[in-house]
Image (spheres, rainbow, N blue to C red):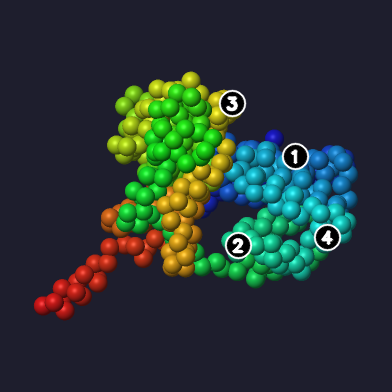
């Protein structure tokens, strides 16, 4: 039996090769493609999910033009089986699309460019950002491509050009004085303004330890994101096994998005945070466990950090117009990268630390590189 995944010359990714059978069980052809994963274990999960799709189609006798919503659900099951991090977004998109698709009783053949454009206009009218709309288009194009790969009736080849206009990205990071203001608003020992809890830290710690731990987590999370450049999910799903728990000097995180490990050396303050958290939470497998069930990771709960961002006035109108909004999801990562580039670290080195597959994504920080030509020009003019 042929291997399910194998390496292809000239590609860093594992590729799948899945046999397609006729009614008698004989192989008629193979479906081939890239798993977009460099880690073999992840590649096998994706290949197994694709093979299951094919078997389901044969077993349940799907027509060439199945209901669109049914097929989207099948795609979500495939995403879940492969362990991809974008499952949550896809579920949101699916639920948002359900009433539209159900009302029209749409089939897979109706998933065309005009429909996608109409959905994009609805999404934009609902106040969603350009980048969010682009993510929705990416999802629908992926559904279309998966249907096409399975030989379903998706009509003639589609040109999806124009569905995802290029978004001018602004790189918002912490500037002079802003980190101090933000961390002051996240300080777990600060006098708290919520009427339901005592203002005094010691009293709050004695009477409401769970709430106090919640405040501590917000502060620890923000500092760790600033000092590591990790994606939010990479950090909150990070295990103590990834941390050097002897002297808390380094950590290794698996970058699921690009399928490779990343090694980071801890700053002094990060080392102190990890050592303190391990002393109190080392019985959980996660560095940031859920408050409800410590055997599970902390979920995405940025409300407290968002409020601190607001109190620190990081999204004043003039700052948003010039640099874009400061967000809990991306701006800490931008801060990490921007500081390294400004200090003279190469884009290639920063790309490795961020877990980028190449320097294309990291090039957004290129304008922050030390302006050696400008300094030389100033020296000449001064002379």
- Mark 2 or 1, closer to the camera: 2
The reply to whether discs 1 and 4 touch (Cβ–Cβ < 8 Å) is no
Q: Is residue 336 visible?
A: no
- Mark 2 or 4, closer to the camera: 2
- Indicate which disc, 3 or 1, sits on the residue closer to the N terminus: 1
Residue 82 location (% of width, % of height): 64, 40
- Indicate which disc, 3 or 4, sits on the residue closer to the N terminus: 4
- Indicate which disc, 2 or 4, sits on the residue closer to the N terminus: 4
Q: CA distance from mark 3 to mark 4?
A: 44 Å
Q: Secondary structure at mark 4?
A: helix
Q: CA distance from mark 1 to mark 4?
A: 22 Å
Q: Which mark is residue 129?
A: 2
Q: Which mark is residue 30?
A: none
Q: CA distance from mark 2 to mark 4?
A: 28 Å
Residue 138 location (% of width, % of height): 65, 58
- Indicate which disc, 1 or 4, sits on the residue closer to the N terminus: 1
Q: Which residue is mark 3?
A: 293
Which residue occupies the foreground of this view, 216 or 62? 216
Q: Residue at x 39, y 35 (%)?
A: 189
Which residue occupies the foreground of this view, 91 or 144? 91
Classify 10 Å Cα crowding around label 1: few (below 14), some (14-19), many (20 and above): some
Occupied quadrant, residue 141: bottom right
Q: Which residue is mark 4?
A: 109
The reply to whether discs 2 and 1 touch (Cβ–Cβ < 8 Å) is no
Q: CA distance from mark 3 to mark 2?
A: 34 Å
- Indicate which disc, 2 or 1, sits on the residue closer to the N terminus: 1
| Location of the N terminus (image quadrant) | top right
């Amino acid at each position: 039996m042929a291997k399910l995944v194998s390496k292809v010359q000239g590609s860093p990714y594992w590729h799948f090769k899945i046999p397609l059978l006729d009614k008698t069980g004989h192989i008629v052809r193979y479906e081939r493609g890239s798993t977009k994963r460099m880690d073999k274990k992840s590649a096998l999960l994706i290949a197994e999910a694709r093979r299951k799709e094919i078997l389901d189609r044969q077993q349940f006798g799907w027509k060439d033009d199945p209901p669109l919503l049914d097929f989207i659900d099948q795609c979500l099951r495939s995403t879940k089986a492969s362990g991809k991090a974008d499952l949550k977004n896809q579920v949101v998109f699916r639920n948002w699309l359900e009433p539209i698709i159900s009302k029209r009783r749409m089939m897979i053949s109706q998933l065309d460019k005009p429909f996608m454009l109409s959905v994009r206009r609805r999404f934009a009218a609902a106040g969603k950002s350009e980048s969010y709309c682009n993510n929705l288009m990416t999802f629908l194009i992926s559904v279309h491509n998966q249907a096409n790969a399975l030989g379903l009736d998706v009509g003639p080849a589609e040109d999806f050009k124009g569905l995802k206009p290029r978004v001018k990205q602004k790189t918002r990071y912490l500037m002079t004085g802003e980190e101090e203001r933000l961390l002051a608003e996240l300080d777990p020992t600060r006098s708290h303004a919520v009427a339901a809890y005592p203002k005094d830290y010691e009293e709050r710690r004695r009477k409401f330890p769970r709430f106090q731990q919640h405040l501590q987590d917000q502060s620890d999370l923000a500092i760790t994101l600033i000092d590591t450049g990790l994606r939010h999910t990479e950090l909150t799903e990070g295990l103590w096994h990834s941390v050097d728990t002897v002297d808390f000097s380094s950590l290794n995180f698996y970058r699921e998005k690009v399928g490779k490990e990343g090694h980071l050396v801890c700053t002094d303050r990060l080392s102190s945070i990890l050592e303190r958290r391990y002393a109190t939470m080392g019985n959980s497998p996660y560095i940031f466990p859920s408050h409800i069930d410590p055997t599970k990771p902390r979920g995405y709960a940025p409300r407290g950090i968002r409020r601190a961002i607001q109190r620190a006035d990081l999204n004043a109108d003039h700052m948003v117009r010039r640099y874009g909004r400061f967000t809990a999801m991306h701006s800490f990562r931008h801060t990490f990268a921007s500081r390294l580039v400004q200090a003279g670290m190469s884009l290639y080195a920063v790309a490795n630390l961020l877990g980028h597959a190449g320097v294309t994504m990291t090039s957004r920080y290129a304008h922050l590189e030390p302006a050696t030509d400008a300094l030389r020009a100033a020296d000449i003019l001064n002379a």
